[in-house]
Image (spheres, coloured by chain):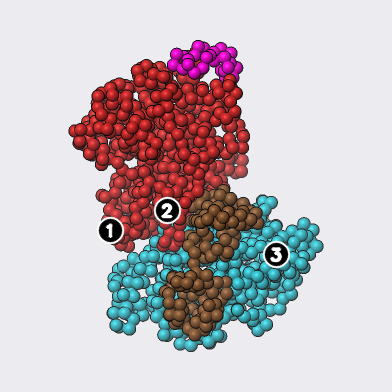
Chain colours: A red, B brown, C cyan
Amino acid sequence: MENKDTRAPKSQQPHVVPKPEHPEHIGGSISIEINEKKVVVPMGTTILEACRNEGIHVPTLCHHDDLCVAGVCRICVVEVEGMRTLQAACAFPITAPIKIKTSTTMVRKARRHVIDLMLSEHYGECYACVRNNNCELQSLANEYNVDHYNFGHVKESQHEVDDSSYSVVRDMDKCVLCKRCVRTCIDLQEVGVLEASNRGDETKIATFLDKDLADVICINCGQCINRCPTGALHEKAVSDPIWEAIEDPTKHVVMQTAPSPRAAIGEEFGLPAGHSMTQELNTAIRRIGFDAVFDTNFTADLTIIEEGTELIIRLFQALVEKKEDVALPQFTSCSPGWVKYLEHFYPEYIDNLSTAKSPQQMFGALLKTFYAEKIGVDPKDIVTVATMPCAAKKYECNRPEMNDSGFKDVDYGLTTRELAKMIKEAGINLPEMPKSHFDNPFGDASGAGLIFGATGGVMEAAIRSVVEFVTGVKAEDVFERANVMPVRGFDGIKIMEIPIGDQVGPVPELIKHLVPNWDWLKGATLKVAVAHGTANAKKVMEDIKAGGELSKCHFIEFMACPGGCLGGGGQPIPTSPEIRKKRAEAIYAEDESLELRKSHENPHVVQLYKEFLTEGPCGHKSHELLHTHYTKRGKYIA
Amino acid sequence: MLVAEKNALTEEIEQLVEKYGKDRSALLEILHEIQKKHRSIPDFAQQEVARLLEIHPVEVYSVISFYTFLNTEPKGRNLVRICQTISCDMKNKQAVVNAVERELGVKIGETTRDRKFTVEYTNCMGLCDQGPAMAVNERVYMKLTPEKAVEILNEVK
Amino acid sequence: MVENLRETRQGEVLFTDYTRGESVKKALSMERQDVLFEIKDSKLKGRGGAGFPTSTKWMLTAAAKSEEKYVVCNADEGEPGTFKDRVLLWEYPDLVFDGMIIAGYVIGAKEGILYLRGEYEYMLPSLEAYLEELRKDNLLGENICGKEGFNYDIRIHLGHGAYVCGEETALIESLEGHRGEARNRPPFPVTTGFNKKPTVVNNVETLAAVTRIVEKGGEWYKTHGTDKSTGSKLLSVSGDCEKPGVYELPWGTTISELLEKVGAKNTKAVQVGGASGVCLNKAQFDRTLGYEDVGTGGSVIIFDESRDMLKVLKNFMEFFVEESCGQCIPCRVGNTKLLEGVEMIEKGEFTFGYINKLKDLGKSMQVSSKCGLGQSSPNSFLTILENFKDEILNYANGGRNGK
């Protein structure tokens, strides 16, 4: 994921000089001057990188650490001695001993002009904008002391807002045409919904034939939102009806929070990336007025049991019963962006998707059945809200099939950003909140559920349980501190083999009715893979189609977003490889700090199967409430 | 679009891809041929081209919308382009435009009701020494007078 | 149809007799570096307008290590008032294509591509037929004219109506099937061009000149023109004059000499270099055409006393607003602002303060735009406002005719 050059399709690869791998071999370093200071840089370093290394600030806008070079906004222009025109620092690879000046009158004037021009066609006022106080255009205007509009300011809206999608709202009046969304959608995610259309003063970012976003093959991942410098792209807000429900005394309003928002929401309150706020958040959510707050990790644990059981059934059918049409490898299904990606781009593989719902949807279904009964409230009066790191979760809860409780299982999907706004609006400063636990009957969940937030997390959680299930050996005795390192980290595609060996354990009580023993797995090697970002998912799928190495896997974890959920489209802005790394560290640290780190050991899950899902995992009731089906959508746009 | 029409279009595009290759650099040539035959590049054709060249439909649309001579909406059977750039403008292109508009009963940018003509402005056609200039489809006409322009249109009629 | 005036054209370098293939055969009998030396000696500079030394371009491409290299002839002549390439391609395809073949030989290319603007589609059948003849004569194909290992062919790629594709990197993007959006440079096409391979992109006229230089030598070529601007220049003359058309004149010709030659009377202004060029007033008519004074890609538009210079400027700015590729902010929004400024002057609703702001903006556009289009589009705005100050000022007093 982190190699921008190899990731992009050929048509979109940046036209820059590739950095030599071993600059020292080709005379390597170059001595340059930045603002009359001598600096030595490796050949091919961009002027921007060279300046940043020296702590010299050069403003940027179209540049993004995750994306290939564009060089279109021209805000980063600098003077290079001997050149007639200014050069874009982000797009200029240093291959000669040049002299750079980053803040001459000509440079400052040109930058101010760029800002003036952007502002002249930027409709709307900062105080009435979702990105107020977190907008790169606003920051630039501030940095360059803009106190009036030099070239006027558009007074009427020029574009209709497209709010057709459940997840992403496009307000092109605020677009500065930096093309970060285009590069995100085409290069980073390889979904390919957005591109520039027309030319000259009519240029704009558009979908195919300028259709509504809901009518094209957008997967709702929201990665474009995370990289939009302004308010042109944002999630569809749902906080208003939630406030109303909270105010309504007849409604029982409950919240579930996913692990990733907890690891990132501190960023919205001025904390550096990498601070988990799980228990402070519980208190804040209650103070906002929610009647209860639950841990999505509970259903993540449940997902592991259901999805793991499903995998065992598939393997049993394929290996023992020798059925031919068993769809393997099994694909995870908890990332709704990934699910929609598969439905559009590889519909012939929907049978490989685990039928297990995502943790969010499992929770919704349980809240309006099991929980409703338990607390004696009519499910129609229960409002279920889910705080997710995700834009696609908004879409997922609106999928028509997601009403197995007899009601809409999850009423609202809220992003991390929206929850932060609600907390602020309630006058609460999150970091100052006292800590508190999640509510019963679901309580605090396991670390296995928690690490769902990072790429490889679902797989690690599954491995911790499956290894114990099958071999009877403690995960801690197989992996140091039960940390499954090979599936961690940000490599685009990770593959791991787990040899079962000759020693198998007894079949646990929970699934005894499904498999008689584990003898059929003796000597087998379980092969798993992990991919994050749909561009990597595409690579995996193409390999599977071609019958390559990955087609021999048994189980593959897919996450639509780079880095997994912690890099989700509903997470705090900005995002960068560095920020995602910090969030992952926070999640793994919290996991290590917990006593309970395996899904099957979660006592509340065990209790649920005893009390409610009495036919066990993948039983009738599970199927009714916790499993779903998918749609072959294809790519054709009507 | 009828299934039979779609199938015919698919076959046609497959042949073009056969001829020009699957590389992205074949895109404009393929689009040009479709445009020439159908006077526009229909939605379905755009998606088929995208499928066969393994790019996204929005990329095809993006390219079409960039170039003046490619379009997604069908135009009249005959495309009349009148040069609006300075040298032709100085040679009284406006009189020609007025005459053409009057004769066809449409304004610049419009298509006649019988879909026989679409009239457009175009930028410099490289006939600045021969202005005012006009093109009807691929054919160019120079040193126009209002009368001559009308005559040409009537010949096309 | 467009006439063919080859028989009646007069000139000292390009518009003279030439037999197809002669220069190609001569070049093939020479070492590649000797051909390069001849071109270097001629001091030929690119005729598209930028004036980059042709030999340097070729040398860099020839030196680039690659199995695959390309010669691209830029016939996307879209600059308002330019039509010399039309004349060359229509009347002198021998000069142009021979130049492309020589370029292919020198840099080691297997393929040449003529990027023909969509507006010239009517030439396509005759150009294709001409290429067929070249193939028959073994001036294209394998082991050309008996030169073992020199395999080279030329194909024609049609443009689709986008002025910006005349910019060489935008042209390459277009060849690759993309929007015609200029690339970041470096890297330059000489090392990373079409399909990321070393590519030399030359103007039609440059390649025609190469054919002559190879035929008659760099020394001979230098006897035409001036010290820094060697050879001749094709000028596309249009506007208010008796004899518009393409003229071949040596560099160093003054504007007045040119005006006289083309029968221009009561001339008020001359736009040199098209919409992206500069607009000269009477006091500047003694200036000379050449890289050292008024450089040009060849467009000369003449305006007599009856013309309204603000209307002229408006026409130019409307052109740029439409033809900007739209990717970079200075060009896309900047040109719109300049056009708005012209419209404000037209209505008499402006302040001098604001016009000065726009001039400042124009200067920023010249240095901060991503490609030549945005870097040169403010030229006419700045020169017309400067050189025709009085006329423009008149608008402050209630419009041109004091309405």
Which chain is home to disc 2? A
Q: Nearer the viewer, residue A459 or A546?
A: A546
Which chain is home to disc 1? A
Q: Residue at x 57, y 30 (%)?
A: A325
Numbered circle sitting on residue C101: 3
Which chain is home to disc 3? C
From which residue to which does the magenta span run?
A497-524
- Which residue matches tag 1? A148
Q: Residues within 10 Å of mark 1 (few under 14, many from 20)?
A: few
Q: Nearer the viewer, residue C240 or C256?
A: C240
Determine the image quadrant of residue A329: top right
Check residue A508 for magenta coloring: yes
Q: Amino acid at mark 2?
A: Lys
Determine the image quadrant of residue A606: top left
Camera-near label (2 vs 1) is: 2
Give the secondary structure at mark 3. Answer: helix
